[in-house]
Amino acid sequence: MGLRNDLQRVSRNGFFCLLAFSMLAVITSCYANSDPSPSAGVSVLTYHNDNFRTGLNPNEAILTPANVNSKQFGKVGTLSVKGTVDAEPLYVSGVTINGKTHDVIFVATEADMVYSFDASNDTQIWATSALANFPGETPSDDHRCPQVEPEIGITSTPVIDLKAGPHGTIFVVAMSKDASGNYHQRLHSLDLTTGAERMAPQEIRATYPGTGTGSSGGTQTFNPGSYEERAALLLSRGVIYTAWTSHCDFGPYSSWVMGYGESNLKQLSVLDLIPNGTTQRGKEGGIWMAGDGPAADPSGNIYLLVGNGTFDATLNSKGFPAQDDYGNSFVKLSTRGQKLAVADYFAMDDSAGTAESESTRDTDLGSGGEMILPDLRDSSGKAVQLAVGAGKDTNIYIVNCHDMGKYKPDDAGIYQRLTGVLPGGAWSSPAYFDNTVYYDSVGHSMKAFPISNAKLATAASSQTSSSFGYPSVTPSVSSDGTMGGIVWAAVAGTSPGFHFTGKSTGVLYAYDATDLSKQLYNSNMAGSRDAYQTDRADKFITPLIAGGRVYVGTPNAVVVFGLLKP
């Protein structure tokens, strides 16, 4: 799923509520515990806005299809930082710092730095190094893998809990290398108002029973130097979950998921989803998901996609892989008792191939991310909870969260499959707004798939006139309830096709969510006024929309877009 794959395929109690506002159903996030959700309707505390990973901010009343145009909207600021910004920025409204109230943007970088900025004037409030407690350490080298370069520090999007600690906490995983050449992965808890460590950073270590790649004596051991945490952090029911992948396809590696208590950073549970897999290159399996984070449903179950890796086609009496290897699968994890365990799964066996053969051909599912849909009603009026995911094989897979379908001939157990609708494959995640799913694929237009009677349309209702090159784009959506929907996308480079490294002019796009053929804005429209530099290696950039502004990560900066002064 790493460099080899890139080259081959491109050459709570948390629950969503439907609130009625003037007869309009407005999707918002309601959490009775500490799971991330928009606070007071505006804060963005986790990747893609919520634990369903919808990418939707339904409380954006400032930016509308009427004023997002090149005359009224454009680049309004730059937040300068040290290091590349691969993680999505986060936003908290109404933070009290030194007696004053601020709306704050939080930025994490590959230089192992975390920053906070006042969103009203773009001034820095504090900056913290995740290396401060470890003299002589630096961010990790890039392991000769150009996926994240030239250094690896904080790649995954952090997560914020406003109720943790006296002022709220941002949790971050940072990678580093010490003076002796040893690699480290640590979980940090930073005070929202000062950036100070609230607790001693937790060194990430793990073992798990298994005889597969990298094992010794029937035990798998997590080697921090072999892994990268690309998938965003998930906070659910007081536990922080991390998920791991490799540097390119450089083994040995496997598909680790770990849970840590947010109150003390102690490890609560470890799961390896391919503990007994083969050592064949590309068969180890990792959790990439293009920077998307594992999703959590109202019962606290976790959903994620595994890229490549061994899949056991020999099933036990309950239909699960006999050797517990879930390569190239859509997996549901139970967190009962704060212990991770596979509760259900889906693995393909269709015209594109089987889970195992797709892994061998590098057309795996896990190149893209997953998303849980808000509760829907089918044609009989029955409530249905669905999740969607897609990867390199051009299909969109829609699973029933209560019966995912397991492994059956011709995908007989799956809820719905859209075949060939993403012709370039997806190295990106979807977004949701007003009964529509938005998906992009490499070298093709972004598409809108409306939902009716709890089924996705088999053909797009609209698509963009622009096409996007590798790695395709992950859209975000802003709206004022169900009105004024705008689909946003940020790309590094302007040409379709494969790009890996090299300086480029980035482009921010905005489209009418009701009709993607209506482009409202792109940052090239006003000549050089809104131009910003990026790098084509910034592959999984996801724009943040909050407080009437749009934030886009780049090397050494976050570029800010908003309404221009008259």
Image (tube, grey):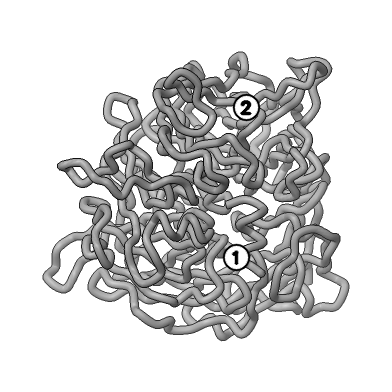
Q: Are marks 1 and 2 in contact (CB under 8 Å)?
A: no
Q: Quadrant of residue 332?
A: top left
Left or right, residue 321 beside residue 438: left
Which of the two labelled residues, at mark 1 and mark 2, occupies the earlier sequence position? 1
Which mark lies nearer to you, 1 or 2? 1
In the image, farthest residue toward the left: 380
Q: Residues within 10 Å of mark 1 (few under 14, many from 20)?
A: some
Image coords of residue 226 (percent x, y): 63, 32
Element type at marker 2? helix
| Residue at the image position 27 percent from the left and 64 percent from the top | 411
Residue 263 visible in this rendered orientation of the protein: no
Q: Amino acid at mark 2?
A: Pro
User: What residue sits 63% from the left and 60% below the top?
Assistant: 548
Question: What is the spatial separation of the Cα atoms under label 1 and label 2, in whole angstroms?
Answer: 28 Å
* Amino acid at circle 1: Arg
Residue toward you, 438 or 366? 366
Q: Quadrant of residue 129?
A: top right
Identify residue for label 2.
224
Q: Residues within 10 Å of mark 2 (few under 14, many from 20)?
A: many
Q: Position of residue 37 (x, y in %)?
A: 45, 44
Q: Position of residue 551 (x, y in %)?
A: 68, 56
| Above/below status of 284 relative to 167 | below
* Residue at disc 1, secondary structure: helix
- List the residue tagged with mark 1: 9
Q: Position of residue 293 (x, y in %)?
A: 50, 46
Nearer to us in this view, 24 or 312: 312
Q: Residue furthest right?
A: 528
Q: Nearer the viewer, residue 289 or 100?
A: 289
